[in-house]
Amino acid sequence: IKILEREVPKRPKALLAKALLGRAYDRSGLDLKSGVIWKELAGGWDAGTFDKTRGDHAYLTALGGLGERDWKYASEAFEETLKLDPKLHRANVDWGWLFMTKYAVPDAEKSFKDVLKYDPNHADAWAGLAWVEWYDAQPNKQRGKQHAEKALSINPSCVEAMLYLAALDVYDSEFGRALIWLDRALKVNPGSIRAMGFQGAVHFMREKTADYEAAKKRALAVNPRGAEFFQIVGKAADRHHLYREAVALLKEAKNLDANSSDVLGALGIALLRV
């Protein structure tokens, strides 16, 4: 954050760097600061700040929409981005993840596969396809494992692929193996709340209270308003039939982010089980 805060004002035309600063603010719970950036980027298209013939400018508009949680606006901007530049693969990958957030799994699958048509060695697209298999109406987690392994064969530092394999191990109660993947993911991205969340889930399942509290402390140090840690642990508890514990954890997530449809949906399901 400090590097970007220092460099972004020096380069007012480096808008992608500004978007990266917005994401860094979001991941640190600095919503007021990120909100200023997202408002500027989301409004740049209509305000005439951006060149409407450039896909990368449409992409910045989409990132602004994502930041403001205006999913429809963001999706329309991603669509415009890819009309202007079908080979802007990071836009299609981000669009795929937006679809995943809204559980539009077939659309997510199409986004990731469209990237692979152009670039069959795009690790992030393979990792996205792995998660498609997780959330599909007829999930095939072993096929997802193959996609994740493909991603890692292309890019051994692909964190999303590592997290898929860790999640699969947590799902199967292979907790020791999950921790190996999570340690590896955190070496690549020490600030990954998702990796810390899966670590917390492992420690919670193993009833290792001190380790769980340490993982929670690390996650909240990165983002004091990060609901994702409790969401991941809560979903894992629900999967392992710890329904009351799942409700308590997901209520903690709700306290941090009352507007997250994913948290609210998971909490509703957990409450039905109690």
Image (cartoon, rainbow, N blue to C red):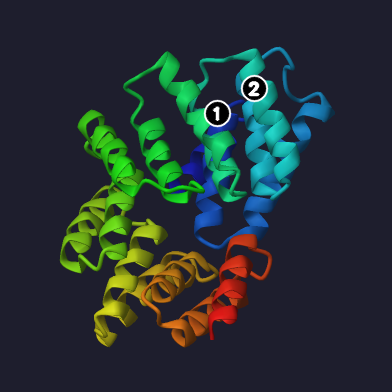
Tell me which amino acid carries mark 2: Thr
- Towards the viewer: 184 or 170: 170
- Position of residue 195 measured from the top left corner of the image (x, y, whole percent): 34, 59
Q: Is residue 120 left or right of residue 259?
A: left
Residue under the image location 40 percent in, 59 percent down? 194
- Position of residue 80 measured from the top left corner of the image (x, y, whole percent): 70, 22
The answer to whether residue 212 is visible is: yes
The C terminus sits in image quarter: bottom right
For residue 5, which numbered disc appears in the image? none
Tell me which amino acid carries mark 1: Ala
2 in relation to 29, above or below: above
For residue 91, which numbered disc appears in the image? 1
Q: CA distance from mark 1 to mark 2?
A: 7 Å
- Position of residue 88 measured from the top left corner of the image (x, y, whole percent): 52, 20
- Position of residue 133 measured from the top left corner of the image (x, y, whole percent): 41, 44
Residue under the image location 67 percent in, 25 percent down? 79
The secondary structure type at the circle numbered 1 is: helix
The secondary structure type at the circle numbered 2 is: helix
- Towards the viewer: 248 or 110: 110
Find residue 31 and report its image quarter.
bottom right
Residue under the image location 34 percent in, 42 percent down? 144
- Towards the viewer: 57 or 248: 248
Count of residue discs: 2
Q: Is residue 257 left or right of residue 72?
A: left
Q: Residues within 10 Å of mark 1 (few under 14, many from 20)?
A: many
The answer to whether residue 158 is visible is: no
200 in relation to 104, above or below: below
Evaluate if marks 1 and 2 touch, with contact meaning CB atoms under 8 Å apart. Answer: yes
The residue to which callout 2 is attached is 81
